[in-house]
Image (spheres, rainbow, N blue to C red):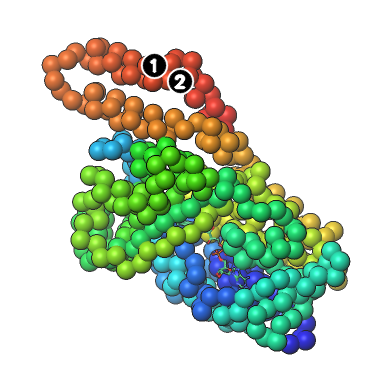
Amino acid sequence: ANEKFDAIVVGAGPSGNAAAYTLAKAGLQVLQIERGEYPGSKNVQGAILYSDALEKIIPDFRDDAPLERHIIEQRMWMLDEHSFVGTHYRSDDYNKPPYNRYTIIRAQFDKWFSSKVREAGALLICETTVEHLLMDGERVMGVHCDRLGGDVFADVVILADGVNSTLARKAGFHGELSAKNVALAVKEILFMPEETIQARFNINEEEGVVIEMMGSVTEGMVGTGFLYTNKDSLTIGVGCMLADFKSNPNRTAPYALLEKLKQHPSIAPLIEGGEMKEYCAHLIPEGGFNAVPKVYGEGWMIVGDSGGFVNAVHREGSNLAMTSGRLAAETVIQAKAAGKPMSARTLKAYKDALDQSFVMKDLKKYRRLPEVLEKSPQFFTAYPGLVNNAAKTLFTVDGVDKMTKQREVMGSFTAARSLRGLLGDAFRLWRATR
Ligand code: FAD
């Protein structure tokens, strides 16, 4: 138990696996500790896997990774109670390998990723929880576990322990998780024959469709819904900011929102007959740029959800997790090669690399959005109804002339938001996403 490792990685999700794999592949002595029975047993994701981040770590992952379907069509729907207005983007370019996005089942994917980590030479210990970090003043010396005889030491500890990030909080690296900065998501996996999925979604074998949704389903709370096609199952889910669940006057429970989504007349026929085999709830760090804590210090680094690296607008998390894990590992490898100590000064290179990458650049781009959405419930209440009503007015052929219809639509918007309100909303949205 007194053995000293080059690095200890806490957690075997995508960020921890990316870090442990990269370190072990470079020949470092790595101990990875996971509290779940096996990697993936505790993990929840939609799940869309973005190839690019994984390719940079395991270029030939397509040879044996458990991938469900590659995505050829992206749908974005704005729902009201009984209809939706949507855009669909489908391209044959997405049908040419190497594919860019896949659906995955996290339990299987994490197991596979972990097998690669072990092949690369890392030592993985499961069913073991890291209870706290071993500190010498400011410096992290190792970890204390509920097994393994307690204490294990390393030059550097990489915290890949997910959204709750208990260890960093206990060590005082950052404050409590705020309900304003996390979404609570629930999802189900519904099984049905492959052929049924293919017929319903107009796809062939191995092809997949993603539907991202917003609108009345979240009852004015900041949130979204999703429906993804796996090989012989569909994943359906919905998530809203935790602070909104707490202040929602109807006190609607997350699973009640999911039930409502499943009963929506545009969704129900797609999922009909699906046999529910898995239900889960999980937090997503959605505070964005301003909620990212300090992610390095004396002998420690934070990667993945633990650092709040999620791009909620584009529904990206696992790729930011893998990229941050890889960049943290590369920092350690370079420091080691240069014979430098794992001090805050050395490990700052990790933050610099993050800042240069899409991870921080994308979070920075949307840094104002969480606040704008929090203060603008109309994006989740008034607008979905207005847009759906406008479509209904324009597409219904009923003898009313088109100019009258156009005036009716314009009138409904100005009545709900006033011209100033509409311009203000457009400006705020542009400023928050430009
Ligand atoms: P996690 O995957 O949470 O892994 C953390 C690991 O650490 C866990 O295995 C846990 O058991 C372990 N651990 C925690 N504490 C300890 C401890 N003290 N000791 C030992 N082990 C510990 N991202 C996408 O890219 N695409 C999507 O489609 C998508 N959809 C999502 C849908 C939902 C409903 C949710 C909740 C998230 C979704 N995300 C998606 C986000 C994505 O799942 C996360 O960003 C990603 O899992 C983060 O990886 P991670 O390794 O940092 O954390």
Q: Residue at x 57, y 80 (%)?
A: 126
Say whether marks 1 and 2 touch (CB < 8 Å): yes
169 left or right, relative to 93: right
Residue 174 appears in which quarter of the rendering?
A: bottom right
- Label 2, on which residue? 422
Which is more toward the observer, 12 or 327?
A: 12
Residue 428 appears in which quarter of the rendering?
A: top right
The local secondary structure at tag 2 comes to helix
CA–CA distance in space, label 1 to label 2 = 7 Å
128 left or right, relative to 265: right
Question: Above or below — where is 355 with respect to 192?
Answer: above
Q: Residue at x 35, y 38 (%)?
A: 216
Instruction: Please state the horizontal and vertical placement of residue 86, each as a whole percent of the image.
Output: 32, 38
Instruction: Please state the horizontal and vertical placement of residue 347, each as a whole percent of the image.
Output: 79, 61
Quadrant containing the C terminus in the rendered view: top right
The local secondary structure at tag 1 comes to helix
Which is more toward the observer, 266 or 101?
A: 266
Which is more toward the observer, 350 or 241?
A: 241
Q: Residue at x 41, y 56 (%)?
A: 186
- Circle 1 crowding by C-alpha within 10 Å: few under 14, some 14–19, many from 20: some
Q: Residue at x 45, y 20 (%)?
A: 422
Q: Amino acid at mark 1?
A: Thr
- Label 1, on which residue? 414
- Circle 2 crowding by C-alpha within 10 Å: few under 14, some 14–19, many from 20: some
Looking at the image, can residue 28 be seen? Answer: no
21 left or right, relative to 335: left
Q: Quadrant of ligand 1?
A: bottom right
Looking at the image, can residue 341 be seen? Answer: yes
Instruction: Please state the horizontal and vertical placement of residue 257, each as a whole percent of the image.
Output: 36, 49
Residue 9 appears in which quarter of the rendering?
A: bottom right
Instruction: Please state the horizontal and vertical placement of residue 45, each as a whole percent of the image.
Output: 46, 60
Q: Amino acid at mark 2?
A: Leu
